[in-house]
Amino acid sequence: MANLADEYGTDVEIYRKALSDTVHADTPTGAPETLLALLDQLGLERHTVETGGPTYIWHEVPGHYDEDAKKRLVSRAMPTLLLAGYIVNIPDDLFDTAAYAQAAGEIRLPAAGPPEPAVPVPPGPPSPGTAAHQRRGA
């Protein structure tokens, strides 16, 4: 079984399987569970084949999705994967610019409203060499 992530040196290689409408997401051999779990959370289905030798793991967009939904799913996954520090490759024919932009915008929004107000820290004694210390000694 070919693994394009191993071949191209990426963390996630998204592509359409030859002679089909299946959209794959390959990860390198031995990819960390954190990456595999993230792909699961983003809506891709994990597949595993035990061969008696290496175990092959890959993800696919659910087969019941129509073409536009497939593109939206993988494009919306991109900002999360990139923000997590992964190197991801996706071909132009599977990339939906609007879905990517929307997902990227949602990542920047605070999840639970505005941050808590900062609690002021009481000032401590000035350290030697600070302006306050020099003024006292003057």
Image (cartoon, grey):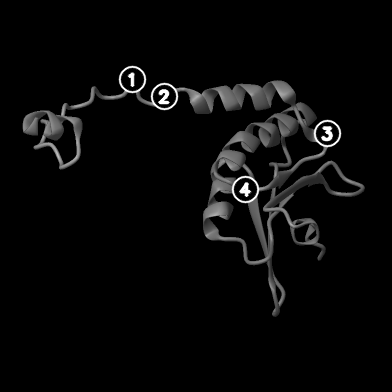
Residue shown at 64%/31% (left/top)?
76
Q: Where's residue 123, x and y in %?
A: 12, 31
Q: Nearer the viewer, mark 3 or mark 4?
A: 4
Residue with the mark numbered 4:
86
Q: Residues within 10 Å of mark 4 (few under 14, many from 20)?
A: some
Q: Where's residue 79, x and y in %?
A: 61, 34
Residue shown at 72%/75% (left/top)?
51
Residue type at the position of mark 3 = Asp
| Nearest the eye: 58 or 93 | 93
Quadrant of the drawing holding the N terminus = bottom right
Residue with the mark numbered 1:
114
Q: Where's residue 119, x and y in %?
A: 17, 27
Q: Earlier in the sequence, mark 4 or mark 1?
A: 4
Q: Earlier in the sequence, mark 4 or mark 2?
A: 4
Residue 136 circle label: none
Residue 110 circle label: 2
Report, in whole angstroms, how far the alpha carbon at label 4 lies from the one at label 2: 22 Å
Q: Are marks 2 and 3 in contact (CB under 8 Å)?
A: no
Report, in whole angstroms, how far the alpha carbon at label 1 lies from the one at label 2: 7 Å
| Nearest the eye: 66 or 23 | 23
Q: Nearer the viewer, mark 1 or mark 3?
A: 1
Image: 37 above or below 90: below
Q: Are marks 4 and 1 in contact (CB under 8 Å)?
A: no
Report, in whole angstroms, how far the alpha carbon at label 1 lies from the one at label 3: 37 Å
Residue with the mark numbered 3:
92
